Image (tube, rainbow, N blue to C red):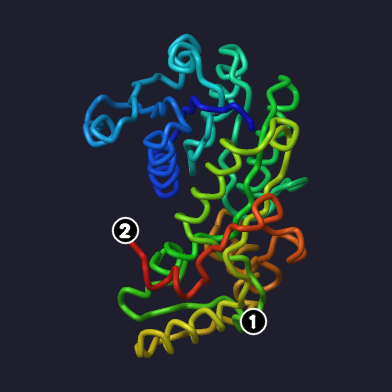
């Protein structure tokens, strides 16, 4: 057993809330002792307290604030995203100073190993920073959230209103995993596997691999709803990204079109053969905001 029983989660948003809930389920069984939720504000935390979590207000610009919050914590799980990724560095430094045994950086997407471009490059650099300070890490590559991404107009997917924009022909194979399954796998790993497996290890999680077109056709067949789908030529998507390297929508569209998997299928879910995740269509129809 890993012996990890005390956890701190930074970020209670899109994926963080699912991880916190899964940790609290294991707390109810006695497998987890403590679940700390790091938050910037004292407001809006009553629901976590009722469920058994311990919200702690921190100042990410204050090393002493972070170190105090992380006392007695075995593993820190970062689900920070966007601009908030910048505070993952100070959080890692504080975790090392506080004696934390494992740091899970905010990955939960495509394979960032060796990348230097965009947000993938930022995440890779932060993982290398953990190595530099001697803090063991565990990375979880999951592909896009199958129960979420298709409901995000920002990325061209708007299932709620039946309108979809696909970059390219939609025929590139992609790894899709629901947030519930990501949380299940992560918490299983951190509470059940030995440190020798966890430390500096890459976990590749996959609910199902399918093309965007296959996922959309499956959704139509399952629900009986006809989608309004627009296809943007891949050359146009590439030109958009050339003009604006920060265009994350176009960046992801090219990932899905060219290769959205995180490696060969035999490398997926190897640490938990009994995983039994949702398929992409099942996740799509069980979306919860």
Q: Quadrant of the N terminus?
A: top right
Determine the residue positioned at 59% across, 69% down: 208
Q: Nearer the viewer, residue 77 or 29?
A: 29
Determine the residue positioned at 43% across, 89% down: 221
Q: Nearer the viewer, residue 165 or 67?
A: 67
Is disc 2 surrounded by few (<14), some (14 to 19) or many (20+) residues within 10 Å? Answer: few
Q: Secondary structure at mark 2?
A: loop
Q: Which residue is mark 2?
A: 289
Determine the residue positioned at 64% across, 81% down: 171
Q: Quadrant of the C terminus?
A: bottom left
278 versus 228 height, above or below: above
Q: Which residue is mark 1?
A: 171
Horizontal and vertical percent position of residue 182? 52, 52
Q: Is residue 27 left or right of residue 199?
A: left
Horizontal and vertical percent position of residue 62? 46, 14
Is disc 1 surrounded by few (<14), some (14 to 19) or many (20+) residues within 10 Å? Answer: some
């Amino acid at each position: 057993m890993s012996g990890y029983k005390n956890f701190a989660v930074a970020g209670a948003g899109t994926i963080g809330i699912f991880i916190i809930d899964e940790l609290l389920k294991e707390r109810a069984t006695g497998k987890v002792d403590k679940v700390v939720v790091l938050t910037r504000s004292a407001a809006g935390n009553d629901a976590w307290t009722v469920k058994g979590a311990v919200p702690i207000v921190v100042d990410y610009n204050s090393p002493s604030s972070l170190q105090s919050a992380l006392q007695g914590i075995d593993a820190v799980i970062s689900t920070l995203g966007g601009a908030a990724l910048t505070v993952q560095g100070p959080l890692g430094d504080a975790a090392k100073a506080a004696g934390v045994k494992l740091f899970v950086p905010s990955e939960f997407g495509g394979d960032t190993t060796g990348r230097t471009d965009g947000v993938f490059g930022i995440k890779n650099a932060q993982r290398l920073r953990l190595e530099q300070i001697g803090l063991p890490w565990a990375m979880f590559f999951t592909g896009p959230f199958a129960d979420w991404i298709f409901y995000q107009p920002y990325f061209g997917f708007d299932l709620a209103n039946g309108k979809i924009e696909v970059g390219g022909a939609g025929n590139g194979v992609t790894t899709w995993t629901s947030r519930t399954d990501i949380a299940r796998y992560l918490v299983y790993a951190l509470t059940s596997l030995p440190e020798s497996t966890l430390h500096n290890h890459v976990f590749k999680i996959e609910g199902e691999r399918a093309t965007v077109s296959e996922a959309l056709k499956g959704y139509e067949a399952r629900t009986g709803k006809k989608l309004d789908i627009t296809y943007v030529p891949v050359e146009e998507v590439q030109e958009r990204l050339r003009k604006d390297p920060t265009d994350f929508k176009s960046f992801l569209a090219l990932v899905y079109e060219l290769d959205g998997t995180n490696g060969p299928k035999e490398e997926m879910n190897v640490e938990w053969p009994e995983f039994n995740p949702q398929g992409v269509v099942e996740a799509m129809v069980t979306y919860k905001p």
